[in-house]
Structure formats: structure tokens, C-alpha cells
Image: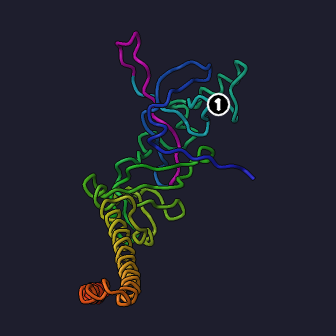
């Protein structure tokens, strides 16, 4: 069984990139997705400045010709492995820029950046904007889409995590990522309101237990007081305090009635 490893947009942003010759050439600027299908097709790569001064134009790298090494660096591959011979390195160069467009069947300009895109149900209900996404490192398929209604809403209500099975892809007409209608039923998670609700339940439960403990404590006190009253009534000194003890027991019973 093939193990599918996923990574999020936030995790791969600014990862170092090694070309087919194992040379550091830049960092991941963004993940590029298919114009209509919910899968990653490439990366935009921000090259290192020449001499730390001269900026170079953005480069584009084909997703299927890449992998992550043990150091968390994005590396160019040839048929799923590191290019060894000069011939393999030359073939791996087709993963870059215009050559890669011929393999994709569309231009890099037609690819989509999911981060910040609007998200809608097929029925047209707006769900918010993409704040993050997880995708399969082998196939590029989106496994989870994290949707936010805005910074303030995140703090109060939380975010919605939509599983890949409900994600249909990008629609250039509505200019948004489309999901099944059932995505609107997914509960928000991580918001202060929900946490406050949980805290209220915990507090109520704790209050109930305290109340129960108070009643039980009062009941025990009443029993012990009644025992003391009986013992005291049998002595001369006790008879003098009998009236006070009676009053004490009655006060405890009244308190128990109030708790209930």
C-alpha cells in the first residue's frame, strides 16, 4: 500500500530549492494549482539574488518532477529519482519554465494560487477565503482546504477544514474554489466563542459538583450534630446547651433546603 504524505502551503513556503545539479537556486514562493482540478501542478521559485544584489525573474517548476529530501528541501528529480548522468540532468531541465508548459498542456499564467482565493459551494454560498491547504506530495491532490472568514472571525468563530473529497476545483467564472454544498455544514473549529462555550460547560459542571458536595457536607454535619445532641442531652452540662444545639441543627437543615 502506497503511503501518501501531505504537506501544507505554509510548510512549503520559502523552502530551499535544489536544481537537477543539486545546486541551491532559490526558495519556494508559491504553490501553483491546476486551472480547474483540485491538485498542485507546480511551484513558483524565487531565485537568489546575484551577488546578493541583482534580482532575477521568477522561475516555474513542474510538480511531478520534484520531491522533498530529508533536509526539507525541494529537489528536481528525473523519473522520481535524483538525476545522475548528464543525459538525465538535461532531461530534468524540461521541468522548468516554458518547457514544462508543453508537458502541462497549458501556460503557467493559467495556473491558480489557492491562498487567499474565495471559496463557494456549488450552490453559490460563500464560505470564506483559503487560509491554507494540504496536498499530496506524490499526486498533488488537495487533501484539506482550510477556510477563514477573516482574521476577526477566526479569533471569534474559528476556521473550517474542508476534506479533499468535497473540493471540486477552481471556477474561473465565479473566480473561486468550488466545494460540494455539504461543505457549508462543516463546523467551525478553534474560535473563542466555541472555547468559551466549552469553558461554560466545564464551569457549570464544576459548579454542580461543588453544590452537590455542599449538600452532602451539610447532610453529614446534620447527622453528626444530631448524634452530639443526643449525647449532650444525657449529661448535666449538655442539657444547658441543648437549646443551642437544636438551633444549630435547624440552621443546617434550612441551608440544605436552600441548596436544593
Q: Looking at the image, what colour scheme do you see?
A: rainbow
Q: Is residue 54 above or below residue 44?
A: above
Q: Is residue 231 above or below residue 92?
A: below
Q: Quadrant where the C terminus lies?
A: bottom left
Q: Is residue 215 above or below residue 197?
A: below
- Magenta segment: does it hold 240? no
Instruction: Please name the residue that numbered disc 1 is placed on.
Output: 77
Quarter occupied by residue 173: bottom left
Residue 254 can be seen in this image:
no
Q: Is residue 157 left or right of residue 5?
A: left
Residue for point 43% across, 56% down:
170
Q: Position of residue 32 (x, y in %)?
A: 46, 42
Q: Position of residue 104 (x, y in %)?
A: 55, 42
- Magenta segment: does it hold 41? yes
Residue closer to the observer: 119 or 217 = 217
Residue closer to the observer: 102 or 152 = 152
Q: Which stretch appears magenta?
A: 38-56
Residue for point 29% across, 88% down:
239
Residue 33 can be seen in this image:
yes
Q: Is residue 98 left or right of residue 174?
A: right
Q: Residue furthest right?
A: 1
Residue for point 46% across, 68% down:
180
Q: Is residue 204 above or below residue 161?
A: below
Q: Position of residue 149 (x, y in %)?
A: 30, 58
Residue closer to the observer: 36 or 253 = 253
Q: Secondary structure at mark 1?
A: loop
Residue for point 59% across, 43% down:
137
Q: Position of residue 7 (x, y in %)?
A: 53, 44
Amino acid at each position: 500500500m502506497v503511503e501518501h504524505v501531505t504537506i501544507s502551503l505554509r510548510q512549503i513556503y520559502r523552502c530551499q530549492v535544489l536544481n537537477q545539479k543539486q545546486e541551491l537556486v532559490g526558495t519556494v514562493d508559491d504553490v501553483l494549482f491546476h486551472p480547474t482540478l483540485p491538485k498542485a501542478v507546480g511551484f513558483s521559485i524565487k531565485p537568489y539574488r546575484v551577488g546578493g544584489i541583482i534580482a532575477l525573474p521568477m522561475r516555474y517548476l513542474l510538480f511531478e518532477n520534484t520531491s522533498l529530501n530529508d533536509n526539507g528541501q525541494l529537489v528536481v528529480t528525473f523519473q522520481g529519482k535524483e538525476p545522475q548522468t548528464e543525459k538525465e540532468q538535461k532531461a530534468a531541465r524540461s521541468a522548468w519554465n516554458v518547457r514544462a508548459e508543453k508537458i502541462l498542456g497549458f501556460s503557467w499564467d493559467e495556473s491558480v494560487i489557492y491562498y487567499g482565493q474565495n471559496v463557494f459551494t456549488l450552490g453559490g454560498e460563500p464560505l470564506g477565503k483559503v487560509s491554507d491547504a494540504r496536498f499530496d506530495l506524490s499526486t498533488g491532490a488537495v487533501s484539506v482546504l482550510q477556510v477563514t472568514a477573516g482574521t476577526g472571525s477566526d479569533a471569534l468563530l474559528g476556521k473550517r477544514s474542508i476534506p479533499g473529497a468535497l473540493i471540486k476545483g477552481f471556477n474561473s467564472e465565479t473566480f473561486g474554489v468550488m466545494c460540494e454544498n455539504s461543505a457549508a455544514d462543516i463546523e467551525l473549529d478553534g474560535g473563542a466563542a466555541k472555547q468559551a462555550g466549552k469553558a461554560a460547560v466545564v464551569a457549570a459542571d464544576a459548579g454542580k459538583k461543588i453544590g452537590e458536595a455542599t449538600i452532602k457536607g451539610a447532610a453529614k454535619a446534620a447527622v453528626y450534630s444530631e448524634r452530639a445532641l443526643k449525647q449532650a442531652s444525657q449529661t448535666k452540662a449538655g442539657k444547658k446547651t441543648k437549646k443551642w444545639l437544636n438551633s444549630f441543627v435547624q440552621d443546617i437543615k434550612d441551608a440544605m433546603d436552600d441548596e436544593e
